[in-house]
Image (tube, rainbow, N blue to C red):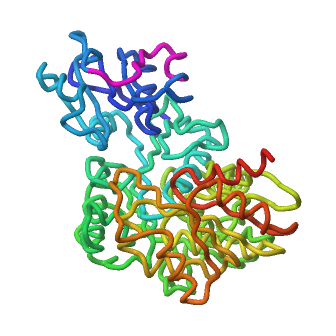
Amino acid sequence: MSKRGKINLNGKKSVHFIGIGGISMSGFAEILHREGFNISGSDDNSSDITKRLQRLGISVAIPTAAENITDDIDMVVYTAAIKPFNPEFRAAAEKKLPLMERAAFVGLILPGYENTVCVAGTHGKTTTTSMVAEIAMAAGLDPTVSIGGHMNRGGLNYRIGSSPCFVLEACEYSNSFSHWHPQVGMILNIEADHLDFFGSLDNVTRAFGKFASNVRPGGTLIIASNIPDFEAIIRGLDCEIVTFGMPSEGAESARFWPRNISYSNGRPSFDVMDGEKFLARVDLPMPGKYNMLNALASFAVACSLGISPEVTAAALSDIMGIKRRYEFKGTWRGIEIVDDYAHHPTEIRSCLSAAKASALGRIVCVFQSHTYTRTKSLFDDFADSFDDADKIILVPIFAARESFDPSVSSKMLAEEICKRGGDAISVESFDEAGKFLRSALCSGDLLITMGAGDVYKVGEELLRV
């Protein structure tokens, strides 16, 4: 593979990152640092990420402050969470420095990479990005990688390669991915989510349609064949359309599909088919049908990159995945503890279904809903998503970027789950959840902590006892 082109920031050499401790910002800061740019940044709190960047020689100021915007800075990059009243944003604006939101900045550097793979979807994009990354590494492509989670192989959320291959997770929130023009784009699924920003499923679908239209002419769009509005999304695209899916779900026309599927402890083995052509058999070490679909999509990417089926299958069979994606945390008094990032009803159902396929005892789920807006807009779907759990403990909603909303609560959700035949309670704190679990769990149970916030701490605290 040829060497990639140089990153061109239009003559800018000194870049400051507001919120450099973020999981995505930190990766791009290091990428530019390795490329010889002068990188500085700030964050409100010190963390393992900021300390790592400092060890690499990147100047990181804690906390954010106007004086961090010095006269030698050429450009300022900020996250979507940064508002105009932020002191550094305000100082940069007063100095008339170029200010660029993170997603737009990423769009600026991607032309330096010939083979850019962007993985999008309401669910599964972090795991699938890690699959594509591990396949590309196994094939010797030496990719640069940016993922919204920490890879179990290497422990980082990014990797810096020297080739023209860049594998990125493409987030739809705030239309971030609309700035990117990949050679290979992927859409795993489209559902109602981030309605605090999009407002409706129609707007979500339109955003994914824009992402699809950004695939470079002559490139490839890999898309699930059962996506609603499939025809509208692909209409008029100047790129190859490659589909994947399950025949049992009406996707008989999918180009990549699984045959001869079997499960062992919830983990699928299957033949990967390209039309009627057998490519390879995969023994996936990750549970659930949803991960099989992620693997199929990754197989399609690998073929578009010219990677042999044998290399791809071997890489998938040895995949290590992402932290907080059905991550085994340990065993406490004969109880296995697993943590998962699932925070949307579809993700919850998929995770619990995978757990049910392997669990020998009860499934006990501690769930932390993520944002009031999501809980409220998908309330009925959440109430119906825990059918495979024997006991559900709901901790307070993780507010994230939102203010308190008294019109929705974990207590309300627990009551609705019980009305629909489930066994759910709500608690006021992690400590209360821990006390309940210590008295209620039995040897042989499977405990799953679930949510996009910090609910994993409940399981970790049990393991310290």
The region drawn magenta spans: 52-65
Residue 63 in the magenta stretch? The answer is: yes
Q: Residue furthest top?
A: 72
The quarter of the picture where residue 141 lies is top right
Q: Is residue 123 left or right of residue 299?
A: left
Decide which of 421, 249 is in the foreground and name it: 421
Residue at (46% x, 33% y) in the render: 27
In this rendering, the answer to whether 436 lies above or below 388 is: above
Percent x, y of residue 33? 42, 20
In magenta segment, residue 294: no
**356 to 70, vertically: above or below:** below
- Residue sitting nearer the eye, 409 or 70: 409
Image coordinates for residue 119, horizontal then vertical, percent? 44, 55
| Left or right: 278, with 379 as reference point | right
Q: Residue at x 65, y 43 (%)?
A: 138
Residue 254 sits above or below residue 242 on the image:
below
Q: Nearer the viewer, residue 154 or 7?
A: 154
Q: Position of residue 451 (x, y in %)?
A: 55, 59
At horizontal 61% and vertical 77% (from top left) the residue drawn is 424
